[in-house]
Image: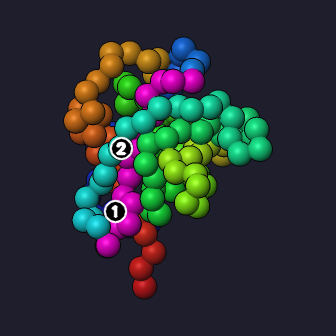
Amino acid sequence: LKLSKPISSAAKLRGSPDLRVGETAINYGFPLAGELSNSAKITSGAVNSLAGYNNNSAFIQFDAASQFGNSGGPVLDASGHVIGVVSAKLDDSQNQLVNFATKSTILEGFLKANKVPFKKADLGEKLELPDIAEKAETFTVLVGCWE
């Protein structure tokens, strides 16, 4: 990977308390990069379920809008800590805003297994959406494939 600028901080995974249905779920990423602007986009919604498609407990369901290009991006809580990584969505005319993210607890296990250091932080002060966007900008980058 080649970065155009250094990453100034690392995301923190959500510690305590345990995630609950109805909590804020904020999607931050680069959907439709090249078609829309190349800048990051932020959308806010809620955690709809603590299980994903077919009751899969490795995922959460959330309703912050997600488009092609959000995959792999963070889903953040109201303090700007990672609660999941965008993984999938139902994509048909009958199911709108049905999105899934791999839970941060699964990400934590992956990072530990691969000896990648990470930090956790407890839910703290609830930030305004513009403040979360500024925080996310410090640790989120567009990853793409170019020849």
Q: Residue at x 38, y 25 (%)?
A: 78
* Residue carrying label 2: 43
Task: Identify the secondary structure beneath mark 1.
Answer: loop
Towards the viewer: 23 or 142:
23
Q: Position of residue 85 (x, y in %)?
A: 54, 45
106 falls in the magenta region:
no
Q: CA distance from mark 2 to mark 1?
A: 25 Å
Residue range (magenta): 21-35
* Residue carrying label 1: 3
**Amino acid carrying mark 1 in the image:** Leu
Residue 31's place in the image compared with 78, above or below, is: below
Dot 2 alpha-carbon crowd within 10 angstroms: few under 14, some 14 to 19, many 20 or more: some
Q: Position of residue 65 (x, y in %)?
A: 43, 48
Towards the viewer: 95 or 29:
95
25 falls in the magenta region:
yes
Q: Position of residue 144 (x, y in %)?
A: 43, 69
